[in-house]
Image: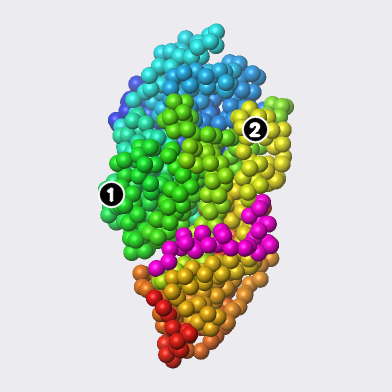
Amino acid sequence: MTAVDLGMPLPVPAAASRPAEMRPVLRLKVSLCDLTYTQQAVSAETMPQAVAGLATHAATVMEFEHAPRIFKFPEDLATALETEGPPDVIGFSHYIWNAYLSIAFARLIKRRFPRTVVVMGGPHYPLPRADQVAFWHQRLAGATDFYVDGEGEIAFADLLLHLNGKPPQTVRDTIPGVHSMTADRRDVFTPSTRQRISDLRDVPSPYCAGLLDEFFARGGVPTITTTRGCPFSCTFCTEGQSYFSRVAKRPREEVAAELHYIGAKMKPLVAAGLARNELLITDSNFGMFPEDKHTCQVLSECQQLYGWPRVVNVTTGKNQRDRVLEAVAQVPGTISLSGSVQSLDANVLAAVARKNISADKMMEIALKSAEAGAQSYSEVILALPDDSKAKHLDSLRGLVDARFDRLNLFQLTLLPSSEMYDRAYRERWGLNTKWRVIPRCFGRYKLLGEEIRAAELDEVCVSLPDLSYEEYRECRVMDLLVSALYNGGVFGTIVAMLRAHHVSPMTWLQRCLKLEHGPDLARVLEGFLEETDSQLFDSREELMSYATANVDRYISGELGNNLLYTYRIRMISEALDDLADLGVRAALDVLRAAGATTGASSLVARVVREGATFHRLKLSEVFVSDPPEKLTQVAVFDIERLLRDDRAGVNVADVRRYKLDEPGEREFVLSGRQRRTLKTYVNQMGDTVAGLGWLLTKVRLADIVREVRTPAGSGVGPEPSRSEAVTP
């Protein structure tokens, strides 16, 4: 663990800082922790940028006698405490993915080092005061001295200045946004929230300050923020409250300097396969603001100079479609366009206060994405207020018909800092919930000679007045089929033929659900439903007791997996032949019903079958320990040209155009680049079913499925007989 002298590289902004001679000297030793679980895999792979920003802001109003220490990994924190002793002040981030881990470490530290002031902060904190008081009594009492409510930089800096030479009991109830318990622990001081930062130049880059250098070599995914806040008011979101409605921005020159600093660090690591070629931008509506085009132009410069980033993970804007498209067009193929509707039902959208977001405009994103050289995705949340099985399936149908490349399908999680968490809201909409363990968020650690066992839990809605639990299960199975058969063009030829004959891919997916399944696929689906039930517990206390007692079973992957991810990879690795066969049978059924000729010798049927085999071979034996270098297929049709035409909006119904002059041999090759990409991700995520399922959410399918080498030369064959004719 390296300590960085903030006084040397840190730029001091003018807006919120004091001149150097006027800044008080902080004589306290400060540690800042953004802990993540590490034992199944590193759960939160992102760099601890947010807590490091607490230090860079504080350095604009004070001089540190001792450089702040930044910790990400629990093992590092344990070692530092045992070898160096405790700091004077230790801060912990408190998110849904590390809340109990942070509390467990904080509680033991507070018990062993009572003089150390423990501070927590983050969005995993209730909104109503009564719930905040209960939260302290149930979880925080005895673990922390102060909790920073809302944005943390200004309030934390104020707290440090107050603690500089003063005991903590003298500063309770004196700092806006800093909550604490009364001395008798009967009540909680909850002063009003501190006003938000209006200009992100007041939080200088922790990268350019050198605070995050050590995390590059440890596989961390660089994370930046160019805007903070969200003008929308969704009731399920932590930023849905009015407190976050104003958007603060980082100056263009600071964004550029930060990206070039990161790019120079990432270049050798990516080349050596030691880091993922990614960037995460935490903005809630990237592309909606004029500055975002400039950010994308800088990203393009970084790609040319450093070969980084290949992929930028970010949520693009919910409005201002043309501006978003113009921004992402600067880096073709790097940013996926998001049209995250959550539901297409007007009543559901009204219930979650998405009234100022146009679902129709968001749907147009999919149609424009190909023009910008980008993939597109949408998001749907199952069991939002006023949802039903019919509404959920209609939303899926609308999105696949809009030609989104991928649907990210979620369950409704009730976050403490969202409006939806409130008891009155739950009762109004009839939200019935259960508890589950968050995937990869569990572990056991040694600290000061004692063992800490922790797991993170979330509360999910599993039924509503118009959505029974059995219907919830049925929707989850359909979500799995969307993930396995539709997302990422996994059976793109079938989908192209369906669209050419005016058949919704959703009709095909529903037919897949009803047909008899092969034995391997049936076994996988049965396991999915069994785990759907067994993962859910009625109470938080019951599940926490079970999870901590069985933490080794969670770490091994026996329990607690993300079911959509895990069972998608199980379908690919254990039931791919059955999956392809199901896709073909269902496609021919619905095409026949639509009037297409689908006899065994018809061109339509032959394209569907050859296309299904084409996609199956691209996925075959990719995730085994020693994959064969090459697989082959007899090529009768130019499947790749058909897919390109479909992507460009060309109707591909007349498949005679894609018949090769002569059959040839098509090769499916796992290239050296793909093997290196797989190795990099597997090294970080593991080669278990759970790890590989997680991998599929982080890497683009095209980067790891087999590359196709097809014989050249396609053309129109002789006029087909009536049995081969394509019926519109």
Q: Which stretch appears magenta?
A: 502-527
Q: Residue at x 44, y 54 (%)?
A: 396
Q: What amino acid does circle 2 point to?
A: Leu
Of 723 and 360, the residue lying toward us: 723
Q: Which residue is mark 2?
A: 543
Give the answer, above or below, for where 450 lies relative to 262: above
Q: Residue at x 61, y 54 (%)?
A: 567
Q: State the image quarter where residue 651 is shown.
A: bottom left
Quarter in which the C terminus is drawn:
bottom left
Give the answer, above or below, for where 343 lies relative to 726: above
Whole-number angstrom distance, CA of label 1 to CA of label 2: 43 Å
Give the answer, above or below, for where 599 lies relative to 681: below
Q: Residue at x 46, y 52 (%)?
A: 393
> Any mark on residue 97, and which?
none
Outermost residue, top side: 184
Give the answer, above or below, for where 502 lies relative to 147: below
Residue 208 x, y percent position in the rendering: 42, 41
Residue 695 visible (yes or no): no
Please, what secondary structure does the residue beneath circle 2 have?
helix
Quarter in which the N terminus is drawn:
top right
Q: Which residue is mark 1?
A: 320
Residue 230 x, y percent position in the rendering: 34, 38
Please, what secondary structure does the residue beneath circle 1 have?
loop
Residue 360 shown in magenta: no
| Dominant SS type (magenta) | helix
Of mark 1 and mark 2, the one earlier in the sequence is: 1
Residue 517 shown in magenta: yes
Q: Residue at x 33, y 30 (%)?
A: 242
Q: Categorize mark 1 by other alpha carbons within 10 Å: few (<14), some (14-19), many (20+).
A: some
Q: What amino acid does circle 1 point to?
A: Gln
Residue 407 x, y percent position in the rendering: 46, 54
